[in-house]
Image: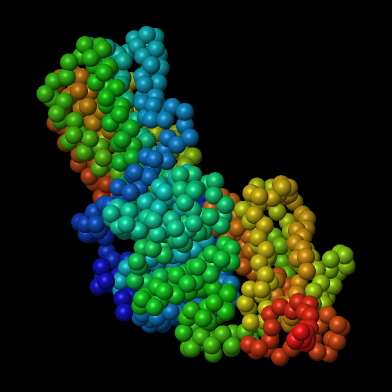
Amino acid sequence: MSGAIRCTNLWKRYRVRGSRRYRTLREDLGAWLRRAPTPRRGEGKEFIWALQDLTLDLAGDALGIVGPNGSGKSTLLKLLAGVTYPTRGTVEVRGRIGPLIEVGAGIHPELTGRENIFFQGAVIGLSRREIVRKFDSIVAFAELDQFLDVPVKRYSSGMKIRLGFSISAHVDPDILLVDEVLAVGDAAFQRKCLDRIKSMLDAGLTILYVSHELSSLERLCPQALWLEQGTIRQLGPSTEVIRAYLQEVDARLTSRGAGRVRTPAGFELQGLTLSDGDGRPRAFLHTGEALTVSLGYESPEEFRPAQVALKVLDDRLATVLLAVWEQKESPAPWRSGRGTIHCTFESLPLSPRLYQVWAQVLREPDLREELPWTLVGTFPVIDGRGRSQRAFLPRGREAPMVVVPTRWEMEPWTSR
Amino acid sequence: MAETVIVYRAQGEAFSLLESLRRFLHYRETLVTFVLRDLKVRYKQTLLGVLWAVIPPLMLMVVFNVIFSRFARMPSEGIPYPIFAYSALLPWTFFASSVAAGANSLTGNYGVISKIYFPREVLPWAAVLGSGADFLIGLVIFFALMVFYHVPPTAYALLLPPLLGIQLVYAGGIALIAAAFNVYYRDVRHGLPLLLQLWLYATPIVYPLSVVPAHLRLAYFAVNPMAGLIDSYRRVLVRGLAPDLVAVGVSAVVAFVTFAVCYRVFKRLEREFADVM
């Protein structure tokens, strides 16, 4: 066992974002001159508790963390990483802690890939010698050999994530904090990341793994923690926790998603409509049909996304489809104001189940999550032959994920 | 490495200057890393590259020479005015750019601050030391100018390092407080260049210290320690005189006190940076 963490009666409070991004001197001076008391810490609605009285012990194990957006998952990781401090309670960390692995990790856009590897490695605390020794494996893992001397600002978002993950995964930490990294990047690289995490886990690392991707979480982590509004809802074997969590998520889902979601930068998603390949609005789909997901939006003039992504999850929250629209590679420019984004999946060989559509928006230029993965809607798929009474197959491992037209044939073996 | 235990508590520990400095020095390699990165980034995608290190003070020197020497007939203590101005502009530019770069050092590094722990004063200090590189390049130009204007250096020039040391302490303090306030109030970003501009004229750069009445000097040095320092640079580098001990002494005391106070405020606010940004 190399790393261990202990949180004791941990509380964390944040100022509510949105209304005031940062203070200006004029406001504060004005308030002071008028003798109006500036809002004291912890009073009224200006603050929210991200974590409430959390106590947790972990050593040499992998803990998966699940919970809805805003339940305190990322806050917990930030506290462990030491980038923010508890409001009450204590955090103890034993061993070298790796940098928080997160989308768009602190990579400098003006530096080349090579320079970034040395810079990041040094900030983490590796000597130049150690970095040189690991350099080749970092590059090989990130698959960026040809782009090493290109400034990172010219990288695609997938390349940046590969670089960031690869550096973090090669610094030999005792404790690894992973926050939803695998939400982006292509499937092959996700696979690779998971394998890498798995081998680090086998080496006895302590891992905290936050993900909406429940199937990979279940595979990686024997234990899971379900956070809900900053408190522990359930902690135990991940199979049990995930089952309980899924039941609750299912119960909460009425075939509408989040409705309107507004991000700090003012970008707003205004609901979702589904239609088939011919543009007819639909409440459900048949196996094999095309699906167009249409998202209403309102985008402020100055807002530019780096990428918009959609994913379709099945009822076990495994990602079935992922569609990433990278703006850099998009032929048409981003349009501000109000409008609709259409994404068409040409044909969906999905087996009859209830599916969820999640959306995510990364912003320019730092690829931070402007809109974290958010459930925007659900749709049922029913059997293509229209037998709607058999629409929902029993859930379980034996139910197929995809259904494609199949043909069975028998060829008699004739000897000649 | 394995047995280090870090504890993060709700209440920060009481500030201890020595303990904070000790911990800061523990991260000196991180500091070097940031300095090198800033230097690498600074002149990327520029045509003139490292020339930008010397252009600002040279430019000001030419302008001041025209305005103050030719038109205003400013006294220059018997030294060619360009040398007179440049000997003050060079350390002043160092001071001004360290404070300006330091002020933006936290807000410009959100990506790193939100990912990994290290004492945050590393960032303002990296900015200050990074500006030092420009200063060293400017120093080469300075010695070239001295040869050109036949102003021979004297042994007093060896006092340059201790003077620079005092300036570093003072600039570090101002950079720390400016960086911390800038996290909370972006007014700093707008106001600071203006303040530095005024500060330049409140310091004996275009004019000699002798224009300040003798009975006001003590107060002058206390309010503006850069005044005592700039005058001392000029004395040891071009006038071949020992520095005025009162000027240096007052500047040093004010510099250290300023640094200690600013550092304390910085450490107090440091814990909130990642949340406020």
Residue B131 lies left or right of residue A163; in this view the side is: left
Residue B136 lies left or right of residue A58; in this view the side is: left
Colouring scheme, one of rainbow, by chain, secondary structure, one colour: rainbow
Check the picture and name the quadrant holding the N terminus of chain A. Answer: bottom left
Residue most toward the front? A416
Please name whichever residue, A173 or B149, is drawn nearer the observer in this view of the structure: A173
Would residue A338 be visible to someone looking at this image?
yes
Give how far across and how far down residue A44 sits, in percent.
54, 70
Give how far across and how far down residue B219 sits, in percent.
25, 33
Check the picture and name the quadrant holding the C terminus of chain A. Answer: bottom right
Please name whichever residue, A50 or A66, is drawn nearer the observer in this view of the structure: A66
Give how far across and how far down residue A341 sits, in percent.
75, 58
The image quadrant of residue B264 is bottom left
Q: Residue at x 49, y 63 (%)?
A: A102
Give how far across and how far down residue A336 sits, in percent.
72, 50
Please name whichever residue, A83 or A187, is drawn nearer the observer in this view of the structure: A187
The image quadrant of residue B61 is top left
Q: Is residue B192 above or below residue B141?
A: below
Q: Is residue A192 above or below residue B130?
A: below
Q: Is residue A80 above or below residue A239?
A: above
Q: How many marks?
A: 0
Q: Residue at x 18, y 34 (%)?
A: B161
Would residue B175 be visible to someone looking at this image?
no
Residue B252 lies left or right of residue A249; in this view the side is: left
Q: Residue at x 57, y 55 (%)?
A: A157
Q: Residue at x 21, y 11 (%)?
A: B150
